[in-house]
Every structure is written in structure tokens, then in C-alpha cells.
Image (cartoon, helix red, strand yellow):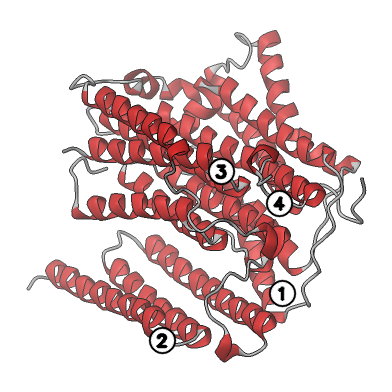
Amino acid sequence: MSGDELRGALSLVFIGAGMLFFLAGSVGVLRLPDLLSRLHALTKADNLGLGLVVLGLALQADDTFEVLRLLLVWLLVLFASSVACYLVAQSALRAHGDPAAATAGPEGSGEDARDGR
Amino acid sequence: MSLALLYGLAGIVLVAMGLYAALVARHVLRRLLGLNVLGAGVFMMLVALASRAVDSAGRPDPVPHAMVLTGIVVAVSATALALALLRRMHRHDGSAQLPEDRAP
Amino acid sequence: MAAEVHALDLVLVVLLVWLGWRALASADLFKAVVQFIVFGLLLSLAWVRLGAPDVALAEAAIGAGLAGALLLDTLARLGRDGAADETRPLGLTPARAGIALACLGLAGLLVASVLLLPESWRGLTGPALQQLGNSGVSNPVTATLLNYRGWDTLLEVGVLLLAVLGLWILDVEPPLPPPAPDPMLGLLLRILLPLAVVVAGYLLWVGAHAPGGAFQGAALLAAGGVLWHLARPLSLPATAPVRAAVVLGFAVFLGVGVAMAAFGGGFLSFPPAWAGALILLIETAAMLSIAVIMLGLFVGGRTGKAGE
């Protein structure tokens, strides 16, 4: 295979793997019993999945700046989603006291308001 | 089916749903959601139509894009003010429904 | 921009319509609002598919982000009883059948009008793109917003101003209990806020020749402010500095327009040589103003003890 074809194929492999992780995270949300385990599965799987997707896209990028931008996107999402996960768990803890009893119910707390990141 | 037609039809469905909810819902917040969905449907129609009017280089018509951008900002401003009014009404009347919708 | 329907578009459209319906019909308003936020984010994808990246940026930041934050904040203030609604909020009753039929009729008329559109339709693409050289920028949407249709944008900034004034006229709201100072949120702020300022400035600058612009930058700044408010409550009372910030965008825009009427070719008509600089000036003032206004819309006008 030529260099370009190899890059393209590798890129597809990474993006596909990333999609698998996203799928795993979604399955986790649907199948896991309580809020904390769902948060844990979703956040970790989505962060890793996005990292793999970014890696795949970076292989198709035109120049270094695009790669750096993609990396910045991944780092920002990593940061924001981890903090959001922590905040949701904190809010559930405050609302229910017992994390195992927390379900994805209507807390309605304004403190969970996220911006569009 | 072209891209413009697909999204244009989707926009029409959103318009119908949003209008129905805005007129029929009893909770004011739900009415506001209906108005926003109605707005989204209109925007989708505008942008879909703009994507049909391409020049030789494939660039779409920028005027509907600008109108939709303006529309998004205005919709959020109106929603913010409406939400403030809702909060006031709830503080004073204890209900989140318009007086004519409340159970007698 | 692709002109052919991809499988992605079919899935996206189905998801959008389904999510739109769920956002309207979910009995639990919290779920409805969350579904609306996701709807907004998917809508940004639809804008990208339709070749409207500027609109996509604005939709994600303003339509999904800021509107979502406003809705959630109001839900929190309404409390459990205020957020309660009937089990089938949009259920079809005989009384509502007429409205449902009218909406369907409207939809039918719209479908007919869309299907009857002429095959080839140029729109305003030609003139808009031809005049780009004289407009001062090379992004057609920015040119339309700030030059060709500057009047509309001036009024749009006016609408934002009116919204925040309307908010300030309403009476005082009791503040939500402040959250315990959270180290994680503080860390998030320390990293994200400077970055938000830099990226907002970048969006403002790049809007002249690539997707971006003042509104998107303002939304980003406002989002940073909203995060700050969540960590440590801000208050934006109608003091002189805040009023000045809120009025600045409209004032500069109007001022430039009037100056053009006096010295240039007419109200808001920019001579090609100055257009770029004037647009940058207006956009900078507008971005600062709109950011403060959007933050003011979220924070609320006045805090303190509720009065009559």
C-alpha cells in the first residue's frame, strides 16, 4: 500500500475504534444499574473514544495547525466532561445522600446547567 | 431527493410540532420550548433553501444564513425575557400556567 | 458542502424530528429541556451539512448552550411544584383537534410551496458574492450581517438591549442558595476563562475571512461568565459601568451609521476603503456588549430580597 492509502486505512481503523468506545459508553448508560456507574462508564468511554477519533482525524489533517486544533478540542472536552461528570455526581449526592439510590431523575438543579461546550 | 428538500421537509415538520405545542401546552415553559422548536423549523427551511441557491463554486446564499443568525439571537433574547416573566408570575401567583389555562 | 443526501442526513433528520417531539411532549420538563439541548446540538450538525458553519457555531453556543442554561436555571427556580405538568401535555382532545388540524394544514401548504419552487433558483448568492471585494471582509455571512444588512444587525443588537432592560425592570428575585465553593469548578474556571477570552478574540478576528464573528465570540465570553456565576454568583446590577457596557455595542453601531450618513454615502453605507476597519470596530464593541447582555440575561437583573 502506498503511504497515503496506509494513512487513510489507519485513520479509518482509529475512527472505527473510537466509535466502538462511544457505543460501549452508550450501552453502559442504558444497562448499568445506578447513576455513578453510568457516569463512570460514559465519561471514560467517551473521552477515550474521542481521543481515538481525533487521532484518526489527525492522520487525515492537512497541516500541523489542524492537528494542534484537534488536540486542543480533545483536551478541552476531556477537561470539561470530567468536571461535568464530577458535578453531576456531586449534585446527585447532595440530592439523594446515598449514591446507590440516585437515578437519572429530575434534580432540576440550576447548578448543573452546562454551557454549550 | 436533494439535501435541501430533505431538510426543508424536516423543517416543516418541526414548524408544525412547535406551533401545536406553543398553542396547546398549558405549562408556559413548554410553550416556550414549542416556540423555540418552531423557530428551529423556520431556520431549517431558510438554510435549506439557501443551500439550493449555489453559485458556480458551490457557495450557498449568505443572506438567509445571516437572517438565521439574527433569528437565533433574537429567539434567545425573547426566551430569556419570557422566562423572567414566567418566574415572576410563578413567584406572585404560585402557578406556572397562564391564568386562562389554570384549573378553576 | 455536499449536495447529495447521505445516510448521515437521513439519520440526523429522523433524530431531529424525534428529539423535537420528545422535547415538546415529555411530561417531565427536566427531561424535555435536556432533550431540547441535545436537539440544539444536533441542529448544529444539520447546519454544517447544509453549508452554514457560521450558523452552526452560533446554534451550538447560543441556541443550545445559552438557551439550555436559561431553561435549566428557570426550572431550578420553579422548584418541584412549578416544574410539574400533566402526564400527556400535548394529548389530543376534541378541543385541541381544531388546532392540530390547522397545524397540519399549515404544514401541507408549506410542503406544497416547497415542492412548487422553481428548479433552479439563484437567490442573492450572485450579488452578495460579487460585492465581497467592496464589503471590507471576505466571509459572505459577515459581509451580509455587518455591511449589506447592517440595519438588521443594528436592530438585532437593539433587541438584545431591550431584552436585558425588560429583565431589569422586573422586580428582584431571591437568589438561589450559593453552592459550596468547589475546587474542581475553580480549576475549570482558571483554565477555561482565559482560554475563552482568547478564543473569543480569535473568533472575532477570524470572522472576517472564515466562519466566526462577533456573535459567536460574544456567546463564548458569556458562557465563561455563566461558568463563573455557577462557581461564584455574580451580580450585574444596573450600575453605570454595566449600563455603559450594555449600551456600548448599539451606540457604536448607531454612531458609525450616523457618521456615514454625515461623511460617507448614507446611513450605514461604508465606503469600500474603510469598510474593513469600520466593521472590525463595530464588531468589537458589539461583542463586548452582547457578552455582557447575554450574561446579564442569565444572571438576572437584580438580586436580593424579593420585593413587591
Identify which residue, C6 or C215, lies in the foreground.
Answer: C6
Give the chain of mark 2.
Answer: A
Give the chain of mark 1.
Answer: C
Whole-angstrom CA distance, mark 3 to mark 1, is 36 Å
The residue sitting at 28% across, 37% down in the picture is B9
The mark lying in front, picked from 3 and 1, is 3
Q: Which secondary structure lies at badge 3?
A: helix
The residue sitting at 42% across, 55% down in the picture is C22
Kindly identify which residue carries mark 3. Answer: B31
Kindly identify which residue carries mark 4. Answer: C298
Q: Quadrant of the N terminus of chain A?
A: bottom left
Q: Which secondary structure lies at badge 1?
A: helix
| Side of C160 relative to A8 (left or right) | right
The residue sitting at 69% across, 71% down in the picture is C190
Kindly identify which residue carries mark 2. Answer: A32
x, y percentage for residue C32? 51, 58
Work out whether residue C138 can be spotted: no
Instruction: Report the amino acid beneath label 2.
Output: Leu
Give the chain of mark 4.
Answer: C
Q: Is the residue under label 3 in contact with that under label 2 (CB below 8 Å)?
A: no
Residues packed near mark 3 inside 10 Å, few (<14), some (14 to 19) or many (20 plus): many
Work out whether residue C73 can be spotted: yes
**Residue A73: which disc?**
none
Instruction: Report the amino acid beneath label 4.
Output: Phe
Whole-angstrom CA distance, mark 2 to mark 3, is 34 Å
Are discs 2 and 4 located on one and the same chain?
no
Q: Is the residue under label 4 in contact with that under label 2 (CB below 8 Å)?
A: no
Q: Which secondary structure lies at badge 4?
A: helix
x, y percentage for residue C229? 74, 62
Residues packed near mark 4 inside 10 Å, few (<14), some (14 to 19) or many (20 plus): many
Kindly identify which residue carries mark 1. Answer: C186
Whole-angstrom CA distance, mark 4 to mark 1, is 20 Å
